[in-house]
């Protein structure tokens, strides 16, 4: 079996104070392997985005550990954690988070610029990845000239431009029609997944379940089991 990419255990995250205090993640645990496309499904408010943010090194948990390739990420120094976010993880946000004033290629180049790759080289790489996601003819345009499905593909290109081993997508098809959503997922499955990469996807969308290797259910901050069949 492939090596373990992510091991998350006993994760706990609280938000707010006093009576508004909410337990968003309640001793959640999961394991994901390289070469695997792992889905997490569950009702709105069950803690899925919070869990992804903790695993991606974006949000510090109150308790528990996240081990990625044998590194306990929440024990890293601030700088090492920033490196981890920049090089090891690619995050695709639910509403894309593209910069409206930049071109499509510039948006994709940003992670490389942050890694001090020079501008021409970064743009060259960005164009390469826009080709990978089938958007070569859109390179000079600003994101608002693109359809929702195209913007999602730009966000995916930006997430993979630094060749992360962990790719995280938060509700990637939420703003897309069914056909576009399925096309994006089939593309991710066929071209972005490989045996040195692990992909985590949070979704409500049963139409894309066919692309999952495994589906975990999240309820009230906990991973409560595996979804099987067509439930
Ligand atoms: N930044 C925040 N501040 C306060 N409460 C939050 C914050 N983010 C999430 N929550 C709360 O934590 C719970 C889990 O949220 P979230 O992880 O966004 O769930 P999901 O992604 O499954 O819809 C919800 O009750 C939500 O209101
Ligand atoms: Mg969410």
Image (tube, rainbow, N blue to C red):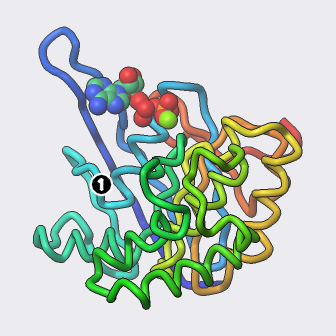
Disc 1 residue: CB within 8 Å of ligand 1 = no
Q: Is residue 12 left or right of residue 49?
A: left
Which type of secondary structure does the marked residue at label 1 adopt?
A: loop
Tell me if mark 1 has few (under 14), some (14-19) or many (20+) residues whose alpha carbon lies within 10 angstroms of its own: some
- Give the vertical position of 207 relative to 88 (above or below): above
Residue lying at 59% horizontally and 26% vertically, measured from the top left: 43
Q: Is residue 5 left or right of residue 179?
A: left
Q: Is residue 147 left or right of residue 222?
A: right
Please give the residue where the numbered disc 1 appears in the rendered image.
Answer: 58
Inspect this view and state whether residue 46 appears: no
Residue lying at 73% horizontally and 44% vertically, measured from the top left: 227
Residue lying at 76% horizontally and 71% vertically, measured from the top left: 134
Residue lying at 52% horizontally and 43% vertically, measured from the top left: 223
Q: Quadrant of ligand 1?
A: top left
In front here: 112 or 15? 112
- Give the vertical position of 231 relative to 140 (above or below): above
Inspect this view and state whether residue 203 appears: yes
């Amino acid at each position: 079996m492939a090596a373990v990419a992510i091991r998350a255990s006993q994760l706990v995250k609280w938000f707010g104070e006093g009576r508004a205090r909410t337990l968003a993640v309640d001793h959640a645990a999961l394991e994901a392997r390289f070469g695997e496309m792992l889905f997490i499904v569950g009702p709105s408010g069950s803690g899925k985005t919070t869990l992804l943010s903790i695993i991606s090194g974006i949000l510090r948990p109150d308790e528990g550990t996240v081990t990625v390739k044998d590194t306990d990420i929440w024990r890293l120094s601030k700088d090492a954690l920033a490196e981890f976010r920049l090089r090891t993880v690619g995050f695709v946000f639910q509403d894309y988070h593209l910069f409206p004033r930049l071109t499509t290629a510039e948006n994709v180049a940003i992670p490389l610029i942050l890694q001090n790759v020079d501008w021409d080289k970064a743009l060259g790489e960005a164009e390469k990845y826009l080709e990978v996601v089938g958007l070569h003819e859109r390179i000079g345009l600003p994101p608002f000239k693109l359809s929702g499905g195209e913007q999602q593909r730009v966000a995916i290109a930006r997430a993979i431009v630094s060749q992360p081993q962990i790719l995280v997508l938060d509700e990637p098809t939420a703003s897309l029609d069914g056909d576009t959503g399925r096309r994006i997922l089939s593309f991710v499955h066929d071209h972005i997944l490989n045996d040195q990469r692990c992909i985590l996807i949070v979704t409500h969308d049963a139409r894309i379940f066919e692309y999952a290797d495994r589906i975990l259910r999240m309820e009230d901050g906990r991973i409560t089991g595996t979804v099987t069949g067509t439930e």
